């Protein structure tokens, strides 16, 4: 049976506007986010291939620079503008229908589900449905549909209404397996945790160097760094000396963790730089932004010494490393020449006692002088709380 | 001896980058130079703070501790709390939910504050020794 699939990834679909949570992280759809070494959309394409659905088209209105690397070998990708997304989807469906497809699956990402697509197809055929919509245990739509090209009008009606309205003849396929709605950083983090704990079929893309620790190709871990399982170190990542990676942390590709930084229960977005001596805990971090899962807040960093972003171009990264290495020794030399020495001869005990304390250098203000701070000296937002008498 | 040093509450700006941190430090410099300064930084407005902001906080703390004073943080916004946790500086400061709580904390456990506290009388019965000498002032006279 000729079954084909069309995946829709929108950056600002009406569906995501209706919901309280966005389906974008830093303006990029969650579907394009890497989870344990592979973008979610590629994992869905892989699942479709595993179910003998080889012809997969991805329709997206995201800019091409947002696309994950490797689109050439993961389905046929079609770029469109935001207002033409649904028209483009309808056109892709018509093309598939006209080229002989017997059934077309339409998936909007959206949610990640580990659905057995063969079961969905079988259900659709058994019920002789025009359209079959997959729903989760609570009856919520999963945005996975099976459409019969023989009932093209019904399908077109649904596509024109952005997958929200159906004509008669729609059947609902109840799916009780793993679903992650991927509409917040918490969901992204949860997906990585489930994958690392091997509770779902989504697994880390890397070599398991010791039980529960997966390392991608070209990743460098300093011998004095500690990796506590389960953890994932993505392709080309660097973990520098005295860093600690623990509690289901997933460092996606080309992440740099600088010296002494502790990364705990965190997912990094590719090309993230984490500065030295930090405590990066319970968050999703990347693109100079940190999403705290504990506090439910996003914090933007303008200081690249704390959280920065490396270039996605390898030559630029190499050039940056070369420049920092070249400037390191002259900077150390200049610092040695001009910086004041912090070494002071320890004074002998009698002398140390004789020297007055810093607190005594300026006379303590008396009771009368305390409120005499000049009002004009401080801005109006200054508030002084003073204790009166014995309260 | 009664000491009623003022507690100064200073509201921090919305952004604490290098420029803002320097301006803020200049504003509070006279406060840091007083004897045993007692400062509360109200961090409710902070939306963005970088390494310079954290550095400025640590500098204030060092200066204040040199003068035997105290610096406390109050109403720390989630954004500021994230940065303080990230840079491991949250554990160096006493943090209070409100500026009022922070101000009140300066007066806790002071002998003067305890002076006006009501004296608690223990509810358990206490047997006191009976003074047998009736001639002594305050002594219990013996029954005939």
Image: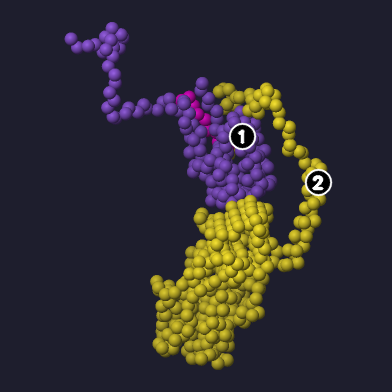
Chain colours: A yellow, B purple
Quarter-of-image position of residue A13: bottom right
Between residues A203 and A94, which one lies in front from this camera angle?
A203
**Circle 2 or circle 1, nearest the eye:** 2
Total marks shown come to 2
- Image location (x, y in percent) of residue A82: 59, 73
Left or right relative to A163: residue A64: right
Q: Residue at x 64, y 31 (%)?
A: B33
- Image location (x, y in percent) of residue A288: 64, 58
Q: Is residue A329 above or below residue A227?
A: above
Quarter-of-image position of residue A119: bottom left
Kindly state the secondary structure of the residue where label 1 is placed: helix
Kindly state the secondary structure of the residue where label 2 is placed: helix
Image mark for residue A334: 2
- Image location (x, y in percent) of residue A150: 49, 91
Left or right relative to A339: residue B9: left
Residue stretch in magenta: A382-391
A199 magenta-colored: no
Between residues A354 and B69, which one lies in front from this camera angle?
A354
In this view, which residue lies farthest toward the left?
Answer: B144
Q: Residue at x 55, y 65 (%)?
A: A212
User: Is residue A316 visible to the viewer in this orientation of the structure?
Assistant: yes
Q: Are marks 2 and 1 in contact (CB under 8 Å)?
A: no
- Quadrant of the frame with the C terminus of chain A: top left
Image mark for residue B64: 1
Q: Residue at x 47, y 80 (%)?
A: A116
Chain for numbered disc 1: B
Q: Is residue A147 above or below residue B59?
A: below
The overriding secondary structure of the stretch rendered in magenta is loop
Residue count near mark 1 (Cα–Cα under 10 Å), binned few <14, some 14–19, many ≥20: many
Between residues A251 and B30, which one lies in front from this camera angle?
A251
How much space separates mark 2 and mark 1, taking CA atoms?
31 Å
Residue count near mark 2 (Cα–Cα under 10 Å), binned few <14, some 14–19, many ≥20: few
């Amino acid at each position: 049976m000729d079954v084909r699939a069309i995946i829709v990834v929108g950056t600002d679909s009406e569906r995501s506007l209706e919901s309280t949570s966005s389906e974008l992280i830093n303006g990029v759809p969650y579907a394009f986010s890497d989870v344990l070494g592979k973008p979610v959309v590629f994992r869905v394409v892989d699942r479709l291939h595993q179910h003998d659905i080889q012809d997969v088209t991805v329709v997206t209105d995201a800019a091409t620079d947002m696309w994950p690397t490797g689109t050439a070998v993961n389905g046929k990708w079609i770029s469109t503008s935001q207002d033409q997304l649904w028209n483009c989807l309808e056109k892709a469906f018509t093309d598939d229908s006209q080229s002989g497809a017997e059934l077309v699956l339409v998936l909007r990402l959206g949610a990640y589900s580990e659905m057995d697509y063969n079961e969905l197809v079988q259900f659709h055929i058994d019920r002789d449905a025009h359209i079959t919509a997959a729903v989760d245990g609570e009856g919520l739509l999963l945005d996975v549909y099976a459409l019969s090209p023989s009932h093209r009008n019904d399908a077109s009606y649904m596509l024109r209404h952005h997958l929200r309205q159906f004509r008669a003849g729609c059947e609902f396929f109840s799916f009780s397996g793993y679903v992650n709605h991927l509409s917040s950083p918490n969901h992204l983090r949860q997906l990585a945790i489930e994958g690392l704990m091997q509770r779902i079929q989504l697994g880390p893309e890397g070599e398991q160097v010791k039980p529960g620790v997966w390392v991608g190709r070209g990743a460098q871990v300093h011998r004095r760094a500690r990796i506590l399982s389960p953890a994932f170190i993505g392709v080309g990542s660097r973990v520098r000396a005295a860093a600690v990676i623990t509690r289901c942390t997933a460092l996606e590709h080309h992440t740099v963790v600088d010296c002494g930084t502790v990364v705990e229960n965190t997912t990094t977005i590719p090309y993230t730089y984490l500065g030295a001596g930090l405590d990066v805990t319970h968050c999703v971090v990347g693109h100079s932004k940190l999403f705290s899962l504990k506090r439910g807040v996003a914090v933007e960093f303008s200081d690249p010494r704390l959280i920065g972003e490396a270039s996605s171009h390898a030559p630029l990264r190499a050039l940056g490393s070369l420049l920092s290495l070249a400037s390191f020794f002259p900077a150390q030399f200049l610092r040695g020449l001009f910086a004041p020495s912090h070494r002071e001869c320890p004074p002998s005990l009698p002398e140390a006692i004789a020297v007055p304390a810093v607190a005594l250098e300026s006379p303590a203000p008396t009771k009368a002088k305390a409120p005499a701070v000049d009002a004009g000296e401080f801005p109006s937002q200054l508030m002084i709380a003073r204790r009166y008498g014995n309260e | 001896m009664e000491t009623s040093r003022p507690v100064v509450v200073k509201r921090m700006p919305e952004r604490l980058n290098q420029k803002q941190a320097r301006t803020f430090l200049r504003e509070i410099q006279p406060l840091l130079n007083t004897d045993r300064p007692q400062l509360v930084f109200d961090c409710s407005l902070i939306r963005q703070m970088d390494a310079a902001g954290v550095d400025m906080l640590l500098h204030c703390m060092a200066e204040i501790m040199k003068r035997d004073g105290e610096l406390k943080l109050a109403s720390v916004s989630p954004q500021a709390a994230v940065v303080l946790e990230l840079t491991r500086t949250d554990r160096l400061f006493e943090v209070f939910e409100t500026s009022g709580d922070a101000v009140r904390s300066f007066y806790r456990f002071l002998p003067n504050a305890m002076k006006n506290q009501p004296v608690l009388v223990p509810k358990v019965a206490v047997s006191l020794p009976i003074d047998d000498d009736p001639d002594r002032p305050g002594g219990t006279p013996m029954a005939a």
